C-alpha cells in the first residue's frame, strides 16, 4: 500500500504545478473513518498501554468483559466525575442487569482513566461479577473512587489514548478468556490532542476480533457542541459488531444511561451486524 506521504510526493512530481500540488494534497487527506479496517501507517502504529491485571476475586472465564475508559481531562469537573462513578455503581446493582449477568454466567468489568500525554491509569481492580453479592461488592468498591484525581490543566482530551488504555487492560486480562469484549469510551468532549482516534480504534479491532467499541457521551445543558461531539464518536471512535453511542445528560441520569448501555452491551454480543447511531 502506498502511504499518503508517498502519494503526495508522486502526484506533486508528476503534475509539477500549483494545481497538481493542490490535487495531490487532496488525495493525501485521510477519508472519514467509516471502514474500521484501514491499513496501519508504515511507522508509529498504535500500541496498547501496558497494565497489570489486578482482579478483585478468583479469576474465572466470563462471557463478557467490559472495559470502561473514563475521560478525566480538564473538561470534566469534580461533580460530573462523581456522577459518572456513582452512576456506574448504581447500574451494576440493578435487578435487570444482575438477571442478565446470571443468565450468561457472569461478566468482568475493568475501569481505566485517560486524558492526554500518556496519562492513563487503572481506576479500580477488575471486578468479577456473577451474582447480586458480587455486584454489590463491585459497586461499593467503585464508589470509593468517586473523587476526581487532581486536575492537570496542561492535559487535554486524547480519545485515542483512552482506546489504547482500554486495549491494554483487555490484553492484560486476556486470561479471563472472555467470549466478547466491550470497550466503552466515556467522555464529554471531542478529541483535541494526540493522533487521530480512528488509528487506535482500527488497531484495537484488528487485534481483537471479538471486540466492539461503544461510547457514552455526557451532554451538558445547553450543549452547543453536542452534534459535533457525537459525530466524532460515531465516525472516529466506535466500531465492531453493533457499536453505538449512548447519551447521558448532566442533570444526573448517568446511572440510567449506563444501565441501558450495559444491557445493550450484553444483549448485542452475539450479533455480527454493525450499527452506528446515537439515540436520544
Image: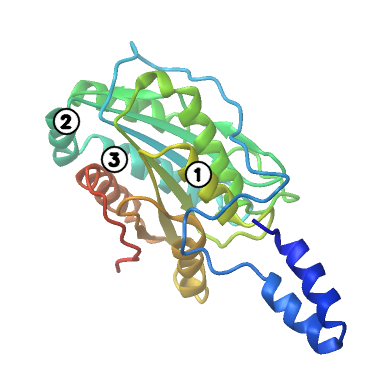
Instruction: Give the residue at the far top of this rendering.
Output: 58
First in sequence: mark 2 or mark 3?
3
The residue singled out by tag 2 in the image is 104
Up/down of 115 relative to 243, above or below: above
Up/down of 273 relative to 220, above or below: above
Residue in the foreground of this view, choosing between 105 and 26: 26
Up/down of 45 relative to 194, above or below: above
Picture coordinates of residue 214 (x, y %)?
39, 51
User: Marks 1 and 3, how far apart in space?
Assistant: 16 Å
Picture coordinates of residue 278 (x, y %)?
35, 66
First in sequence: mark 1 or mark 3?
1
The answer to whether marks 2 and 3 mark residues whose Cβ atoms lie closer than 8 Å is no
Mark in the foreground, 1 or 3: 1
Picture coordinates of residue 259 (x, y %)?
26, 47
Residue in the foreground of this view, choosing between 13 and 141: 13
The residue singled out by tag 1 in the image is 70
User: Marks 2 and 3, how far apart in space?
Assistant: 20 Å
Picture coordinates of residue 47 (x, y %)?
62, 37
The residue singled out by tag 3 in the image is 90
From this viewpoint, is residue 147 visible?
A: no
User: How many residues crowd mark 1 within 10 Å: few (<14), some (14–19), many (20+)?
Assistant: many
Q: Quadrant of residue 168?
A: top right
**Badge 1 element:** strand
User: Marks 2 and 1, how far apart in space?
Assistant: 26 Å
- Locate the C terminus by quadrant: bottom left
**Badge 2 element:** helix
Instruction: Give the residue at the far bottom of this rendering.
Output: 19
Amino acid at each position: 500500500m502506498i502511504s499518503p506521504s508517498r502519494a503526495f510526493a508522486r502526484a506533486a512530481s508528476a503534475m509539477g504545478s500549483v494545481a497538481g500540488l493542490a490535487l495531490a494534497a487532496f488525495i493525501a487527506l485521510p477519508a472519514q473513518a467509516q471502514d474500521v479496517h484501514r491499513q496501519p501507517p508504515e511507522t508509529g502504529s498504535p500500541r496498547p498501554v501496558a497494565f497489570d491485571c489486578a482482579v478483585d476475586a478468583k479469576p474465572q472465564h466470563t462471557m463478557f468483559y467490559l472495559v470502561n475508559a473514563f475521560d478525566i481531562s480538564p473538561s470534566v469537573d469534580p461533580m460530573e466525575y462523581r456522577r459518572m462513578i456513582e452512576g456506574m455503581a448504581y447500574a451494576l446493582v440493578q435487578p435487570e442487569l444482575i438477571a442478565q449477568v446470571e443468565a450468561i454466567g457472569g461478566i468482568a468489568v475493568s475501569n481505566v482513566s485517560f486524558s492526554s500525554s500518556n496519562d492513563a491509569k487503572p481506576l479500580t481492580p477488575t471486578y468479577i461479577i456473577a451474582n447480586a453479592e458480587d455486584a454489590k461488592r463491585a459497586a461499593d468498591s467503585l464508589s470509593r473512587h468517586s473523587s476526581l484525581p487532581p486536575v492537570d490543566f496542561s492535559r487535554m482530551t486524547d480519545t485515542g489514548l483512552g482506546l489504547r488504555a482500554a486495549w491494554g487492560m483487555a490484553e492484560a486480562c486476556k486470561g479471563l478468556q472472555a467470549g466478547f469484549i466491550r470497550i466503552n469510551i466515556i467522555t464529554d468532549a471531542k478529541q483535541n490532542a494526540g493522533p487521530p482516534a480512528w488509528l487506535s480504534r482500527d488497531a484495537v479491532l484488528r487485534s481483537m476480533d471479538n471486540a466492539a467499541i461503544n461510547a457514552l457521551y455526557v451532554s451538558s445543558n445547553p450543549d452547543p457542541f453536542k452534534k459535533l461531539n457525537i459525530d466524532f464518536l460515531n465516525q472516529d471512535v466506535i466500531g465492531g459488531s453493533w457499536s453505538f453511542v449512548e447519551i447521558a445528560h448532566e442533570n444526573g441520569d448517568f446511572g440510567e444511561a449506563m444501565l441501558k448501555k450495559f444491557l445493550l452491551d450484553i444483549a448485542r454480543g452475539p450479533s455480527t451486524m454493525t450499527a452506528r447511531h446515537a439515540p436520544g
